Image: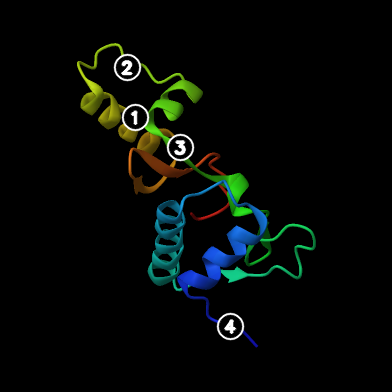
Amino acid sequence: MKKTLCFDDFYAEFQKNRLHNFSAEGLRVLFNYLEEFEQDTGEELELDVISLGEVSGGFVYRQYIINSLCCDFIEQSWQDVAESYDVDLSKCKDDEEKYKAVSVYIQENLGYVGEVSGGFVYRQYIINSLPF
C-alpha cells in the first residue's frame, strides 16, 4: 500500500527532522525536481521513514537508499557556493555575472536542481550509480 505525497506532506517530513536546511521555496524546488524525475523516468520514488529508522526524509530508489535528502541536496546562496567550491569569479564584473558563473559551475560540476531567491538548490555529491 502506498500513499502519494503532496508538497505539504513532503514539507512536513522535513520540518519534523531538519527545520533549518531548506527554505519553503527550496523544498518546493526539490519536490518539483523529484516529481519531474519520476515523470521523466517512469520510476517511483518512495518516502519511507519507517525503513530508515532514525533517519527521516530519505528516499528509497530500487535497492539504493538515499539517506536523508538534506545530506545529499543543499540550498545555498550563490556567495556560499562560490566560497565552498572556490569558484573563480575574478573575471566577473558584477554580482549578476558572479551569480551566472556560479549557476554554470553548479550545472557543470554538481547536480543542479533549481534556483531560489539569491541562490540554488543542488546535489552536493554526484553518485554515478544513481540516475538523478
Q: Secondary structure at mark 3?
A: strand
> Cα distance, mark 2 to mark 3?
17 Å
Q: Secondary structure at mark 2?
A: loop
Q: Which residue is mark 4?
A: 3
Q: Kindly check if marks 4 and 3 are in contact, taking CB atoms under 8 A apart as contact.
A: no
> Cα distance, mark 3 to mark 1?
11 Å
Q: Amino acid at mark 1?
A: Val
Q: Which residue is mark 3?
A: 76
Q: Residue at x 22, y 25 (%)?
A: 97
**Residue 102, labelled with which disc?**
1
Q: Kindly check if marks 2 and 1 are in contact, taking CB atoms under 8 A apart as contact.
A: yes
> Cα distance, mark 4 to mark 3?
31 Å
Q: Which residue is mark 2?
A: 89
Mark 2 or 3: in front is: 3
> Cα distance, mark 4 to mark 1?
37 Å
Instruction: Give the residue at the far bottom of this rendering.
Output: 1
Q: Nearer the viewer, residue 10 or 16?
A: 16
Mark 4 or 3: in front is: 3
> Cα distance, mark 2 to mark 1?
8 Å
Q: Is residue 21 above or below residue 106?
A: below
Q: Does residue 16 appear anywhere in the picture?
A: yes
The first of marks 2 and 1 along the sequence is 2
Mark 3 or 1: in front is: 3
Q: Residue at x 42, y 60 (%)?
A: 28
Q: Secondary structure at mark 4?
A: loop
